[in-house]
Image (spheres, rainbow, N blue to C red):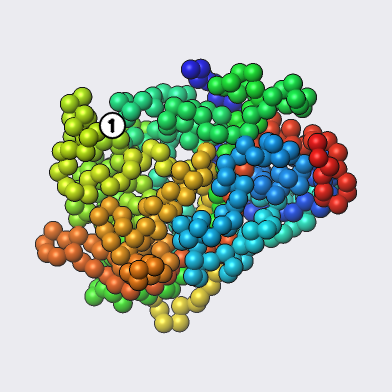
Amino acid sequence: MKYPQNFEFDDLQGLLRFGHGKLRGSCFLLLNIVDVDAAREWLNTAPVSSAVTTNPLPDRALQIAFSVDGLRALGLRESIIADFSDEFIVGMTGDESRSRRLGDVGANAPQQWDWGGDASHTPHILLLLYAAKDGIGAWRSHVEDEQFIQAFELFRELPTRDIGSIEPFGFLDGISQPRIDWAHRQGTDLHERDRYSNWLAAGEVVLGYANEYGEYSNRPLIEPHEDELATGLPDAEEQLTRKDFGRNGSYLVIRQLHQDVPGFWGFVDQASGSTEERDQLAASMVGRHRDGSPLIPTSIEEIPGVSPQNSENQFTYAADPDGYLCPFGAHVRRANPRTGDYPPAVTGFISRFIRLFGFGLKRPDEDLVASTRFHRLLRRGRGYGRVLAPEDAIKADAPDGERGLQFICLVANISRQFEFVQNAWMMNSNFSGVNNESDPLLGNREPLLNGDDTDRFSRPDPAGPMQKTCRLPQFVTVRGGGYFFMPGLRALRYIAALPGSDKNGKDNPS
Ligand code: HEM
């Protein structure tokens, strides 16, 4: 198999590599196309940022992603669209069973969303602008030139605000990310990956490269003899005679998550007898202290893919098999259980063989959590709303307000990565041997069909019975969301060069 020695950073949108955390100003726009020709012309010269490093890094960035309706509006052939994944084509709100699996029921139901809830129309384009804090206005004016104004109508501007790296509940965020293996340092072979590693195959976040199975995720491939335009696209790595429309592209999942900050801190305060207990309960729910330090002692054994400076990520839960330090149900332990392909202590051929047939479990729940490397997310979200410190949030007159997270993640497989994590790990009321509870931050607290509760949070206690906190209210409510495709820059030029349209946003079939 051929692997790239030099990753095509010039074809990759910068958000995948940089995250733009240093550019504190941001502006997220949902757009609809009203004039297809003008839209294509604008796209042809739009200053979309690549992932090439410059010194210094640019102080402005623009990234673009399309919904399936957006790609259709721009005239992409149905035969190409059909090769995208089903989740992308059907959309985040496209069927009830998906909404149920994602926890989008009750107060989270798409019918209640501010945007994206209407499955019959998803906004065409998500435009993400980043700049130094006081430069975002000028950058936006520059991007919204005459052509832009003719091409698009603003469907919605999503709230974003520079609230620093502390998310609205008051915890340091953006600490743990997978380290993308751009240079293909690490094999994906099962036998090389017994242990948790933070390195992640590039094909887990970028289409057109080998993923953690050593395979290529499905994506649109084009026969060049059927399509002249496709000559500008890269070759498909595993099928060299075909052109790769997906290469260097990624799926972008966005969810606007409202956070009830007074509700969260008011609840943990009431449930605790002292400030220390309150802070301990809140930290147990998140799985980290407010300053980001882990609840687990950092490991002496080096974790591959965690740089030595990143000591707050130098741990796995192998050091806490009973959940005494970090409860199994804590947000970060659900979101990334840091499991390898085999449980700890399985190293040699014989012990692997024994485990393969399901023997040798030390604890009955040991095998319950899937190997993490197939379910990682590259998070790229931003917070919004006015900061409300926990100490103020517990006051009786704490102001309500719109604050929360524009949760964004980039993945190569929406269902195996984002939907799996959201459904099997976050929303599932049976996770890692705990029952009747879902993610303490994200749970919608809706009872199950059989009437069982999901609104508890339990903390194993070495000194006695499990400590249970009951009747957790809903702290996070979904306000909007959608699935988008963030193309590589050559695919973007292909879209911009698509032929023919009338002026009403409808394309002629090509
Ligand atoms: C308003 C909603 C949310 C809040 C307040 C929140 C908060 C946090 C915080 C404070 C951390 C620890 C900082 C870090 O490790 O970077 C974290 C980590 C994480 N969160 Fe969330 N989060 C939210 C939604 C989500 C959602 C919807 C998902 C995925 C479906 C998610 C996935 C993750 C992952 C994968 C990690 C890293 C875990 C690790 O690698 O140890 N979060 N979150």
Dot 1 crowding, Cα within 10 Å, few <14, some 14–19, many 20+ = many
Q: Which residue is mark 1?
A: 194
User: For the point 53% across and 66% down, which residue is it?
Assistant: 109
- Residue 479 % position (x, y): 56, 64
- Residue drawn 55% across and 69% down? 402
Q: In the image, is the residue at mark 1 within 8 Å of ligand 1 by its beta carbon?
A: no
Horizontal placement of 163 versus 469: left or right? right
Tell me if residue 315 comes above or below residue 109 in the rendering. above
The residue at the point 48 percent across, 17 percent down is 1
Residue 185 locus on image (x, y percent)? 41, 23
Q: Could you tell me which residue is drawn at 47 percent across and 48 percent down?
A: 418
Q: Above or below — where is 405 with respect to 139? A: below
Q: Report helix, strand or loop for mark 1.
A: loop
- Image quadrant in which you'd find residue 95: bottom right
Residue 272: image x %, image y %? 26, 73
Position of the C terminus, as image quadrant, is top right
Q: Position of residue 359 (x, y in %)?
A: 17, 38
Q: In this view of the protein, which residue sits in the foreground, 164 or 341?
A: 341
| Res. 17 visible in picture | no
Front-most of residues 466 and 110:
110
Report which quarter residue 461 is drawn in. Answer: bottom left
Q: Residue furthest bottom?
A: 396
**205 with respect to 123 (left or right):** left
Left or right: where does residue 33 sit relative to residue 10? Answer: right
- Decide which of 111, 393 is in the foreground and name it: 111
Amino acid carrying mark 1 in the image: Asp
Question: Could one spot residue 98 in this view of the protein?
Answer: yes
Depicted 456 relative to depicted 153: above or below:
below
